Image: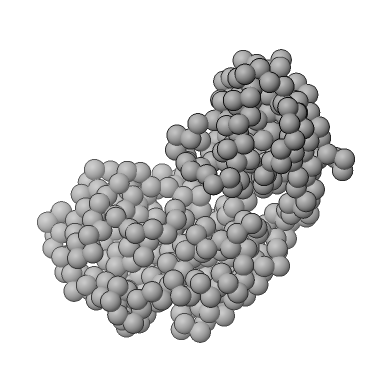
């Protein structure tokens, strides 16, 4: 199972998180009191671990995901496949016996990539593998044929701005980290357009390549001309960089048939286990149901969706009834900029004081080693104490920081951030 992103509201982790455990007006708990209360969940934590790792739920989330991914396939925003995925999950959550299963409407972008083709014409004929970036405009029907300028950074592009006019900018930026290097995918087209380029081709944001381009989102800006933009393989970016350094003239022909349609109706999918004592207070777990169109979306973010569902399934199967409502939200439109989560936040932010924790799993599904956390030193001490309950499976590390596209709206209001595992939900 994968760790989950957790967000705690400010008043939840204020003064050793006492307020998170006392909303009835009674005095705040001391840190020792909190440690003792956490220790009291040892048996429950063990029961959840045993069921998930050794019991009948072993591999269940994987098996559920495999059937889903094989049945539905890719789930691009605005597509029929995403619509089918939402219907599939709505039915599955009902059959699982979860409560208050419902859909909340969202307007999402509808973009289709169409035909894509690129070839290097000079200094020799070479087919270039490309994947258009989300919301890219199309080339003219006849395509674009232009000389290439290769740069390794935005700074280099600005320094060579006069050379870039009328050319295709190829970015061969080194991979440092996803968070830092992804800025070239997000802003590459805008920065190239600023200096008069006719298109941009961006080295895929990856630390490793087997001649496979990656897709993803990109952000046009209203005051900058829009130009076609796509990712290319690491190998082709490196090759063109070498050619350029040798003074070789490079010419590329690019053709992209992308289309953008009016926004489509979609839905965030919601299910709950209603709290026994504070049902109005919410612990939210989530993943995003949409994906890009060139794979099955099993990792991004099918895994996060099914891990989040599994969190509620495990608790239900053990007959546990948490004090606070556990709410599962499967976001729509995340890959297009978190539009489903944004609209959910706008709808529910007036009750923000009732959201104790908001979690997102969207960092890949690997063997967990701990959780990410952003918050005060006092809150970190509590988190470290909670993580001792996961010692039986050696998932005890606390990393800094944690974040996520769909939880960014809550974070912007000054909310501390965490990652954790499902037993954590029961403490609140």
Is 154 situated left or right of 64 in this image? right
For the C terminus, the image quarter is: bottom left
Count of labels shown?
Answer: 0
Residue at image position (28%, 43%) is 376
Which residue is depicted at the point 62% across and 36% down?
236
Which image quarter is the N terminus in? bottom left
Query: Which is more toward the observer, 23 or 219?
Result: 219
Residue at the extreme right: 142
Q: Residue furthest front?
A: 124
Q: Nearer the viewer, residue 113 or 219?
A: 113
Residue 413 position within the rendered picture, expressed as x and y whole percent measured from the top left: 45, 45
Q: Position of residue 190 (x, y in %)?
A: 67, 32
Q: Is residue 315 above or below residue 129?
A: below
| Quarter assignment of residue 128 | top right
Q: Is residue 216 left or right of residue 395?
A: right
Q: Is residue 4 left or right of residue 192?
A: left
What x and y, as percent, mark residue 244? 64, 22
Q: Quadrant of residue 388?
A: bottom left
Viewer-proximal residue among 310 and 270: 310
Coloring basis for residues: one colour
- Quarter of the view holding residue 419: bottom left
Rendered residue at 78%/28% (across/down): 146
Q: Kindly identify the residue that appears in the image at 52 percent across and 57 percent down.
A: 300
Asked if residue 351 lies left or right of residue 376, the reply is: right
Provide residue 350's location: percent of width, then percent of height.
Answer: 50, 56
Would you say residue 232 is visible in this rendering?
A: yes
Q: Say if residue 343 shows up in the picture.
A: no
């Amino acid at each position: 199972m994968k760790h989950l992103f957790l967000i705690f509201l400010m008043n939840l982790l204020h003064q050793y998180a006492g307020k998170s455990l006392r909303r009835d007006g009674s005095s705040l708990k001391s840190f020792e009191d909190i440690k003792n209360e956490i220790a009291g969940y040892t048996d429950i934590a063990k029961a959840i671990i045993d069921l998930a790792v050794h019991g009948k739920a072993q591999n269940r989330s994987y098996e559920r995901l495999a059937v889903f991914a094989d049945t539905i396939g890719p789930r691009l925003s605005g597509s029929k496949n995403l619509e089918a995925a939402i219907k599939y999950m709505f039915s599955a959550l009902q059959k699982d016996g979860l409560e208050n299963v419902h859909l909340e409407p969202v307007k999402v972008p509808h973009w289709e990539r169409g035909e894509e083709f690129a070839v290097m014409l000079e200094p020799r004929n070479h087919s270039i593998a490309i994947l258009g970036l989300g919301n890219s405009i199309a080339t003219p029907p006849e395509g674009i044929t232009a000389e290439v300028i290769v740069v390794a950074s935005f700074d280099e592009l600005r320094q060579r701005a006069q050379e870039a006019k009328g050319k295709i900018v190829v970015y061969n930026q080194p991979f440092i980290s996803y968070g830092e290097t992804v800025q070239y995918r997000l802003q590459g087209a805008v920065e190239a357009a600023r200096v008069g380029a006719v298109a941009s081709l961006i080295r895929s944001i990856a630390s490793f390549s087997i001649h496979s381009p990656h897709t993803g989102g990109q952000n046009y800006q209203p005051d900058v001309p829009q130009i076609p933009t796509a990712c290319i393989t690491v190998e082709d970016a490196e090759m063109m960089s070498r050619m350029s350094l040798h003074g070789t003239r490079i010419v590329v022909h690019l053709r992209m048939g992308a289309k953008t349609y009016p926004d489509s109706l979609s839905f965030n999918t919601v299910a709950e286990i209603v709290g026994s004592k504070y049902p109005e207070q919410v612990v939210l777990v989530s993943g995003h149901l949409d994906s890009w169109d060139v794979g099955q979306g099993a990792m991004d973010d099918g895994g996060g969706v099914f891990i989040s569902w599994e969190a509620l399934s495990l608790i239900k199967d053990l007959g546990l009834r948490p004090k606070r409502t556990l709410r599962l939200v499967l976001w729509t439109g995340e890959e297009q900029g978190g539009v489903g989560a944004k609209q959910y936040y706008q709808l529910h932010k007036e009750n923000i004081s009732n959201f104790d924790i908001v979690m997102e799993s969207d960092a890949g599904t690997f063997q967990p080693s701990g959780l990410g956390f952003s918050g005060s030193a006092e809150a970190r001490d509590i988190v470290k104490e909670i993580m001792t309950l996961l010692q039986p499976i050696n998932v005890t590390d606390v990393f800094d920081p944690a974040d996520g596209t769909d939880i960014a709206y809550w974070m912007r209001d000054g909310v501390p951030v965490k990652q954790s595992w499902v037993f954590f939900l029961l403490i609140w």
